[in-house]
Every structure is written in C-alpha cells, then in structure tokens.
Image (cartoon, rainbow, N blue to C red):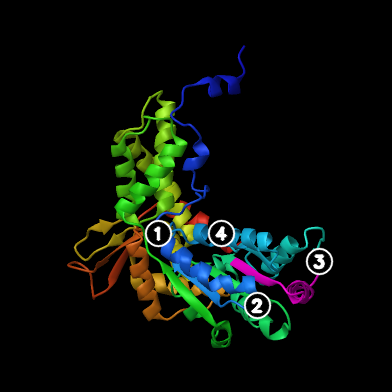
C-alpha cells in the first residue's frame, strides 16, 4: 500500500514553489515602496558614522508593506555595517507576541545576548543590560512592529526614548510600526515630548500596483503557463476594492492555486479566484480584526457581544430586524468592557469616528433610524459572524 504522503506529493500541481505566494515571503525588491525605503535609509544612515538617528514611526493599513519595508532596510543596514565593521546592531520585535514592556525588553536583550537567560530578572535589570550593550559604542535600531499592542506602551516608549540621555557612547533608535495613524495622539504628553521622531504613512496599493506585485510572485510560485493573467487581475481587483491589502491579494491567489490542485486543474482561472474569495473572506476578516487598534477592537467586541445577546429589534410598525443595535447601547457596553480590561474610556466623539472607521473596513453597517422608530438614532449591524469575531478578540484581550 502506497504511503499517504507519497500519494499526495505525486499529484500534479500548478505550483513550482508555493512558498513564494504565501503572505510570509518577503521579496528582494519591494515594488512601489522605493520612496519609503529611501527615506528610512536616509534616517538610519548616520548610525554607520557613529551618529544618532531620529526615531521613526510608520503608519498605514494592514498589507501596505510597512513591516516588509522596515525589515528590508534593517537587513541591509546590518549587512552593510558588517562589511564596514561599523558598530551597528538591530533587532525586530513583534509586539503582538511580546505585548508588555517586560516582554519587549526581554526579547531585545535575548537577541543581543543569545547565550544568556534573563528569565526572572527585573525589567530594570534588563533595561540596564540594554543600555550596557549600547554603551559600548553601538548604534542600535529597535524595530517594534504593532507597537500599539504593548499594554504599557507609554512606559516602554518613554524609557527607550530617554535612553540616549543616559548614554555617553552609542545610541538607541526606535522604528515603531502601527496600523493606527492616531497611535501617537494616545500617548502621554511626557512620552510624546521625549520622542523626537519622524513619521511616515504608507498608502494602500491600487489595483495596478497589486497586479504587478502578484505577477512577480506568480512567476516564482507557479509553473509556467499555469495561471491565467485574468486570474491575477481579478485577485488584484478584489483586494484593491476592499482595502488595497497586498497580503490579501497574495492569499487569494495562493488559495486559488490550492483549489486548482484539489480539482486536478492544469491552470488557475478567474473561477478559482472567485471561489477562493468566498473561502478565505472569513480568514481575512478575522486577521484584520486582530490587527485593529485596541480601542477599535473593544468597540467591535461590544457590538459582537450585543449581537449575540439582543433579541430582534421591534419597530413601532411591528416589524423585526435581526442583529440591529442602537449606537448608544453599543457605546455604553463599550465603556463597561473598557473598564473591565482597565483600558482608557474614549469620548463619545472619538467613538463616532471609530464606528465610521469600522464601517469603512466593511466590518459593520450603519444606518440612521427611519420610519417606525421613536426618536433619532444610528443603527449598527455587524457584517460578519458575531460569535467568531467575539472569540477572536477575546483571545487577544486575555492573552
């Protein structure tokens, strides 16, 4: 009897190397991000001459190339520093995984002192080890991805940004990445004043840019002649319509290829892309939810919870509507949830902006009350499965 894996691997496939069409692959050349990469390079270049670099904060929606560009520049910086024997070091921290000041600092010093175990040491001790490493004359770049996910982010940023005041030699440079353009505004005024930072916003990709990105990936990932150009164009158009997310476009084409393999097809067509869109939409939405700023997650969590709890809305005419919520009750529930998780409660004005943002992402629908409803209010309805969204956010909040 043939081995199960042998049977699977013996099947014909449209893929030459599937790794090139996964969202985790970073190409050597990042299309349409040359301007942003150049600016990052200019900001960090002084480190190679022993100078201090400005802190840099990068903003933009999910899938706009922020992380890939930052890691690309950091890799080139460290490679060049090695060639020139320059005293430059750097590391990358995913703050979704390391979501407290202590965890971030522990990850950083572990990368710089791989032979040491700092488990159980205080945050103050670990911070001093970091200063000691920089104080030997090194210029250090700390790439903090999704930095807004750090629970005590004010303490972390304030401590790292003031480190240069304590160093006679060497320096620390923060390269922060966030999906939340308003992230800096939520920081304590004392922290903001200590940053001395530059900022950069990454725009969403348009359909033509996404098509070019997908075409380059398809050449590497698929066997020659196994992907219709129309399929590439459709995947790019779908992603551009919704958010300009390159990762979403890549995922659509990858899933379309998998569907073609399962059906034993020799080519990926528009039909596979359409089917892939239906199949991965939920996966994409849940990933998007987890990358939202904390406050937006709390509002969405309130909407999902109320959707599961509330009976259908009855109008004065006797009609009922499933899953429709009053804006005011959502805000009241959000306030309770924010207090429960010891988060700052934002103003009702900010809440209205948040609702508009969630609607722009396509996560909710809103309408003004009309006939059959007493008074004037805004109705809110969740666009996706409430239970799955609630569970996904819950895991992040309790992590």
Q: Distance between the Cα atoms at labels 3 and 2?
A: 21 Å
Q: Are the residues tagged 3 and 2 within 8 Å (C-beta)?
A: no
Q: Is residue 150 above or below residue 247?
A: below
Q: Earlier in the sequence, mark 3 or mark 2?
A: 3
Q: Which residues are magenta?
A: 121-143
Q: Earlier in the sequence, mark 4 or mark 2?
A: 4
Camera-near label (1 vs 3) is 3
Q: Distance between the Cα atoms at labels 4 and 3?
A: 30 Å
Q: Is residue 133 visible?
A: yes
Camera-near label (3 vs 2) is 2
Q: Which residue is mark 1?
A: 307
Q: Position of residue 246 (x, y in %)?
A: 41, 52
Q: Earlier in the sequence, mark 4 or mark 3?
A: 4
Q: Which residue is mark 4?
A: 71
User: Which class describes the residues within 10 Å of circle 1: few (<14), some (14-19), or many (20+)?
Assistant: many
Q: Distance between the Cα atoms at labels 4 and 2?
A: 20 Å
């Amino acid at each position: 009897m043939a081995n199960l894996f042998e049977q699977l691997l013996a099947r014909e496939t449209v893929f030459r190397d599937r790794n090139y069409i996964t969202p985790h692959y970073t190409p050597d050349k990042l299309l349409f991000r040359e301007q942003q990469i150049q600016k990052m390079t200019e900001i960090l270049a002084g480190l190679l001459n022993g100078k201090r670099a400005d802190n840099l904060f990068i903003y933009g929606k999910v899938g706009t190339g922020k992380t890939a560009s930052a890691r690309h520049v950091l890799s080139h910086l460290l490679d060049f520093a090695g060639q020139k024997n320059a005293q430059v070091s750097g590391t990358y921290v995913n703050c979704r995984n390391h979501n407290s000041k202590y965890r971030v600092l522990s990850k950083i010093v572990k990368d710089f002192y791989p032979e040491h175990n700092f488990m159980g040491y205080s945050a103050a001790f670990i911070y001093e080890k970091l200063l000691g490493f920089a104080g030997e004359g090194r210029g250090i770049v700390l790439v903090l991805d999704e930095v807004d996910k750090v629970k005590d982010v004010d303490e972390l940023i304030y401590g790292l940004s003031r480190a240069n005041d304590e160093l006679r030699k060497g320096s620390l440079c923060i390269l922060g990445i966030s999906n939340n353009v308003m992230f800096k505004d939520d920081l304590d005024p004392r922290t903001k004043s200590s940053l001395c930072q530059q900022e950069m916003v990454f725009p969403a990709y348009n359909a033509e840019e996404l098509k070019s990105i997908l075409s380059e990936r398809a050449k590497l990932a698929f066997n020659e002649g196994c992907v219709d150009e129309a399929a590439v164009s459709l995947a790019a158009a779908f992603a551009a319509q919704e958010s300009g997310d390159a990762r979403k476009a890549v995922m659509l084409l990858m899933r379309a290829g998998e569907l073609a393999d399962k059906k034993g097809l020799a080519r990926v067509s528009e039909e596979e892309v359409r089917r892939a869109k239906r199949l991965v939409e939920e996966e994409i939405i849940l990933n998007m939810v987890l990358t939202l700023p904390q406050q937006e997650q709390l509002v969405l969590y309130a909407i999902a919870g109320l959707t599961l709890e509330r009976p259908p809305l009855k109008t004065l005419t006797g009609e009922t509507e499933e899953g429709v919520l009053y804006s005011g009750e959502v805000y009241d529930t959000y306030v309770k949830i924010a207090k429960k998780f010891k988060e700052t409660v934002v103003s009702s004005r900010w809440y209205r902006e948040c609702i508009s943002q969630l609607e722009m992402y396509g996560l909710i629908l809103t309408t003004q009350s009309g006939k059959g409803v007493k008074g004037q209010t805004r109705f809110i309805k969740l666009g996706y499965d409430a239970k799955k969204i609630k569970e996904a956010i819950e895991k992040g909040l309790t992590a």
